[in-house]
Amino acid sequence: ITDVSSEEGQKPPSRTTVMFSKSVLVAAAAAACALEVADAFVAPTPAMARLNVRSAASSPLARTGLVHAASTRPLASRRTVVFMAASDDHVKELKACKKDLWDLVDKTNANPVMVRLAWHDSGTYDVNIKEWPDCGGAIGSIRFDPEINHGANAGLSLALKLLEPIKKKYPLVSHADLFQMASAVSIEHAGGPKIDMKYGRVDSEQCSPEGNLPDAEPGDNGKYGGAGGTASTEDSTPGGHLRKVFYRMGLGDKEIVALSGAHTLGRAWKDRSGLGAESTKFTSKDAIARKDGKAGIGKAGGSSWTEKWLAFDNSYFTTIPDDSSDPELLKLSSDKIVFKDDGFKPFAEKYQKSESDFFKDYAESHKKLSELGAKFENEVTGV
């Protein structure tokens, strides 16, 4: 096990790294393939002047699970490799956390709010800002005030409270990972696709600015969005507004439509967004909304886009264009536009006809969204 020592008088690196000399690069690459861990090439820094090689038994790093090799050759004169892997404890916590999240949404029917929490964390991303965490994204910053109290995040503090016991139980799981895992689990639990998620996100300690998330309807000035956030999202049309929001994230028309399909889950609350009704026949306390037919919807009330709003399927795309659908179902201008806009319409019609095509594109789009702006350390997949 190796520690990277600092130059005298300097604070040691805050992140544990393990160094490979050029002569063992081939062996390291083989180990990476065998152990499914990530590597990255970096230039040496003065703080990496030499390696202090210790025995595995005595080193405080012995519990990290890092694959390692050592060289006593000065690092400043050669190119180095930083090679990091998730510890066994981290992987175990991620797997156990996923099971607990499944049980949580099964008990509480909190699938929709978990999806929204993760999306509103990652949806602040600006592809044109290169500095982390200033770029926003899936960085866990939504847990902080004032971000959690931004207007678009009304009601999401309830999701944070539900997740608090799980975060305390699994301290090695970052907030950013927890939010994104809860979202993916909620989709799968509701009958949607299993999403090929990646974990190892680093938590930010600063908030993202307000104004980067999309509006469902225009404001009092007749326009969607505004000049706030990292870039203006203001537009007089719903399609133009959605493109300004999602293009800023580096996403395209396919992702806009596929992700819109997640409105097959959940409800709009009049006391939060000002949209919809106080309650409908589909959101009353006796309504059956789950895919498995079990009773329970959580708190009653609100307006849903679909009849079975705790089931993930393509019913959003079959309901929105259907003039004969129940009038109590929600159809906002930002929903209707996916069947009217020339760029959106081909995707909407494709998903209307084929649930499997929707699931495929949705899973890819969800994964992209979940990784926006994220800084990964000790990447973990296959959980």
Image (cartoon, rainbow, N blue to C red):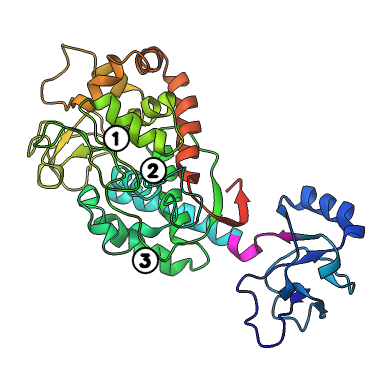
Answer with left or right where residue 257 lies relative to residue 42.
Answer: left
Number of residues whose C-alpha sits closer than 10 Å to that of mark 3, classed few (under 14), some (14–19) or many (20 or more): few
**Residue on which the image places disc 3:** 165
Amino acid of disc 3: Pro
Residue 120 spot, x, y in % from top left: 33, 47
The answer to whether residue 21 is above or below residue 126 is below
**Residue on which the image places disc 1:** 265
Amino acid of disc 1: Leu
Q: Are marks 2 and 1 in contact (CB under 8 Å)?
A: yes
Which residue is found at the position 37% from the left and 25% from the top? 257
Between residues 202 and 228, which one lies in front from this camera angle? Answer: 228
Between residues 20 and 285, which one lies in front from this camera angle? Answer: 20
Quadrant in the rendering for residue 294: top left
Q: Which residues are magenta?
A: 82-90
Q: How far apart in space, not on screen, are marks 2 and 3 (Cα)?
A: 17 Å
Amino acid of disc 2: Ser
Residue 132 spot, x, y in % from top left: 49, 56
Q: How far apart in space, not on screen, are marks 2 and 1 (Cα)?
A: 10 Å
Sequence order check: which comes first, mark 1 or mark 3?
3
Q: Are marks 1 and 3 in contact (CB under 8 Å)?
A: no
Q: How far apart in space, not on screen, are marks 1 and 3 (Cα)?
A: 25 Å
Residue 279 falls inside the magenta stretch: no
Identify the element where label 1 is drawn: loop
The answer to whether residue 372 is above or below residue 356 is below
Identify the element where label 2 is drawn: helix
